[in-house]
Image (cartoon, rainbow, N blue to C red):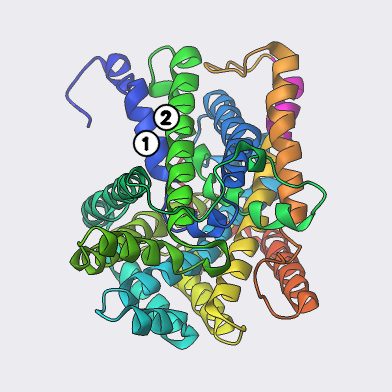
Amino acid sequence: MSNDNSTNKGTLKAKLTITTLAIMNITTVVSLRGLSSEAEYGTTAAFYYIFAALVFLIPVALCAAELATGWPQKGGVFNWISQAFGHRLGFLAIYLQWLATTIWFPTVLIFAGVSLAFIGPDQTFDQALAANRFYSGIVVLVVYWFATFISLKGVKTASKISSTAGLIGTIIPGILLVTLAALYIANGNPVHFDFSMRNFFPDFTNFDNLVLAASIFLFFAGMEINAVHVSEVENPSRGYPLAIIYATIFTVIIFIFGTLSIATIIPKSDINLVQSLLIAYDKLFAHFGLGWLGNITAAAIALGVLGQIIAIISGPSAGILRVGQKGYLPLSLQKVNANGVQKNILMCQGAIVTALVIIMTVLPSVQAAYQMISQLAVILYLGMYIMLFLSVIYLRYKEPNTPRPYKLPGGKVGLWLIAGTGLIGSILAFVLSFIPPSQISTGSPSTYVGILVAGTLIFTVIPFIIYACRKPSWDTAMDD
């Protein structure tokens, strides 16, 4: 909240407490939809979550904070990476951020379709309906274009819907899942995974175990978005890292115990990437004689997904619009409606989602489509993160005297330890994302890899073509 009549703007700017910033980061990162994909690992999932937090989540947040305070102008990753490596790669970076989010939409909406299917009274029918890829395709398109319609109405309408839906559809169901699973275990019921800590560390001799786990990195993506608020925290060199630590701990706890809750109820051989979360709720409610809550929870989770989509659908596209107005997008893509919303970019975004949904219907199963589309989003997003880590390292040497209210601790050693760890982790996950996981039926391995390689190359070439074709008339920016 702001007070335009105040003369003490400097005082008002430092309004974010450590707790507030931690909650903002938790809201950005936490989602229930990915828990099923790691449930089959059992206690090993806890290792993967902690590992991803240490080598990716925390480095991203801290590196983004240094970049955001050193170069706070509008544009985010575009400005940071442009400052280090030029506008061509800066444009590539913000394009990848936008595109990865766009490709991510169908995977989230598939989950919404599954949730809606489980509203019915017959679980057997619900599971069959949820597995039908034509049903999923229709739901994805209807919900996505409805969310786009809401987004075109402006930020105020979207924010009201998304905030309420997030509470009802993510936070409350998450707490409920962990609480019921804990009560289930406390009552002496059978657990379908081995609690032993000897299973905490993965079998590194089995390369396939690392492949599916690479998708965890996308679970933690987005922490850089809130780095723009670092200067609004009192004593950012102390407050911001504390907020990140608190957010990371809470996020990891939710992911670990939510995942283990599913593994508790459903045997490893029966875990499905798309349906298992809803099945776990149904089984828990049935056990406690609360079967009627299953349908309500499924509806709430679907609402939560819709709220998340509405909240995010216009964010990255608004960012690429601002960059495009500096001369990097054709005038046709810079058009906004009466509400100031980037209508043509949203239409282009919708066309990509629609094309992906059509492709999804020809794959062997909804589960295969979910995995493939998720991995393509991971690959593209990690491409941006690799450039982000390289930028923070390069700029420390290129522009050492640029003021940075927040700076990675430990001097050059701390820089290389934190940013270097994030860089190596991102490259490792990037490479692993091209390998088909043996745990999931994705059809022909060569087809799977071919689609990912082709998709990555095609989507990466597009911004270079746009950059090469840019014209002076495309620059319509009024400032910065």
Rendering coords of residue 41 (x, y %): 60, 53
Q: Amino acid at mark 2?
A: His
Of labels 1 and 2, earlier in sequence is: 1
Q: Amino acid at mark 1?
A: Met
- The quadrant of the image that shows the N terminus is top left
The residue that label 2 is drawn on is 229
- Magenta: main secondary structure equals helix
- Inspect this view and state whether residue 117 appears: yes
Q: Write the residue at 53% across / 44% down.
A: 220
Rendering coords of residue 378 (x, y %): 63, 56
Rendering coords of residue 217 (x, y %): 60, 47
Give the distance between the C-alpha atoms of the residues marked 1 and 2, in whole angstroms: 10 Å
* Position above or below: 234 against 228: above
Q: Write the residue at 72% across / 40% down.
A: 425
- Label 1 residue SS: helix
* Position above or below: 351 against 187: below
Residue 339 as seen in the image, left or right of residue 309: left
In the depicted view, which residue is nearer to us: 134 or 199?
199
Is residue 317 located in the magenta-colored stretch of the structure?
no
Residue 304 as seen in the image, left or right of residue 435: left
- Inspect this view and state whether residue 153 appears: no
Rendering coords of residue 147 (x, y %): 33, 67
CB atoms at circles 1 and 2 under 8 Å apart? yes
Q: Write the residue at 72% across / 69% down.
A: 452
Residue 318 as seen in the image, left or right of residue 380: left
Name the quadrant containing residue 439.
bottom right
Name the quadrant containing residue 103.
bottom right
* Disc number for residue 407: none
Extreme residue in the front direction: 188
Number of residues whose C-alpha sits closer than 10 Å to that of mark 1, classed few (under 14), some (14–19) or many (20 or more): some
The residue that label 1 is drawn on is 24
Magenta residues (range):
390-400
